[in-house]
Image (cartoon, rainbow, N blue to C red):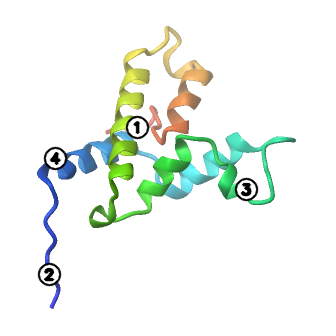
């Protein structure tokens, strides 16, 4: 018999908001972070441990089920939503053509070119 676990309604809303803002699939985010973290001095013996933050934390949350979220995961989700929204609100004059701005969003798992 499978027992349904109930989550805090606030966590349910946060989960939906997080997945709306973090619109890059986990494997695509992982590849992006590996690319961003690459370079002569970027990788240590275990590349997964050297993925850029907070992207690595976001990637970890993307691999979880709602019922497995920890308080730290919930904080990562809130932080990611806030960071993404701040960057979107601070859209530069060149918009999507501004690579630094777009890459900052991609580091957080948000591709501005993906329509909602």
Residue position marked by numbered label 2 in the rendering: 3
Residue 69 falls left or right of residue 54: left
Residue occupying the point 46% across, 53% down: 25
Q: Tell me which numbered mark, 3 or 4, is placed earlier along the sequence.
A: 4
Query: Is 5 located above or below residue 15 in the figure?
Result: below
Residue farthest to the top? 93
Q: How far across and how far down the image is residue 104, in percent?
A: 55, 29
Residue position marked by numbered label 4 in the rendering: 10
Q: How far across and how far down the image is residue 75, in percent?
A: 35, 43
Q: What element carries label 4?
A: helix
Q: How far apart are marks 3 and 1 (CA)?
A: 22 Å
Q: Tell me which numbered mark, 1 or 2, is placed earlier along the sequence.
A: 2
Give the camera-side residue of 23 and 33.
33
Crowding near the residue tagged with mark 2, few <14, some 14–19, many ≥20 C-alpha atoms within 10 Å: few
Q: How far apart are marks 3 and 2 (CA)?
A: 38 Å
Q: Is mark 1 on a helix, strand or loop?
A: helix
Q: What element carries label 3?
A: helix
Crowding near the residue tagged with mark 3, few <14, some 14–19, many ≥20 C-alpha atoms within 10 Å: few
Residue occupying the point 54% across, 44% down: 55
Q: Tell me which numbered mark, 4 or 2, is placed earlier along the sequence.
A: 2
Residue position marked by numbered label 3 in the rendering: 47
**Do labels 3 and 4 touch, CB within 8 Å?**
no
Q: Distance between the residues labelled 1 and 2?
A: 31 Å
Q: How far across and how far down the image is residue 110, in percent?
A: 45, 38
Residue position marked by numbered label 1 in the rendering: 80
Q: Distance between the residues labelled 3 and 4?
A: 35 Å
Give the camera-side residue of 34 and 9.
9
Query: Is 61 located above or below residue 38 in the figure?
Result: below
Query: Is 60 located above or below residue 110 in the figure?
Result: below
């Amino acid at each position: 018999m499978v027992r349904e676990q109930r989550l805090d309604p606030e966590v349910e809303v946060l989960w939906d908001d997080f997945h709306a803002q973090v619109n890059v699939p986990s494997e695509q985010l992982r590849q992006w972070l590996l690319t961003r973290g690459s370079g002569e001095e970027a990788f240590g013996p275990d590349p997964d441990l050297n993925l850029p933050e907070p992207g690595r934390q976001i990637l970890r949350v993307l691999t979880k089920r709602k019922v497995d979220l920890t308080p730290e995961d919930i904080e990562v989700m809130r932080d990611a939503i806030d960071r993404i929204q701040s960057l979107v609100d601070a859209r530069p004059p060149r918009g999507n053509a501004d690579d630094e701005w777009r890459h900052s969003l991609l580091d957080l798992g948000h591709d501005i070119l993906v329509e909602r």
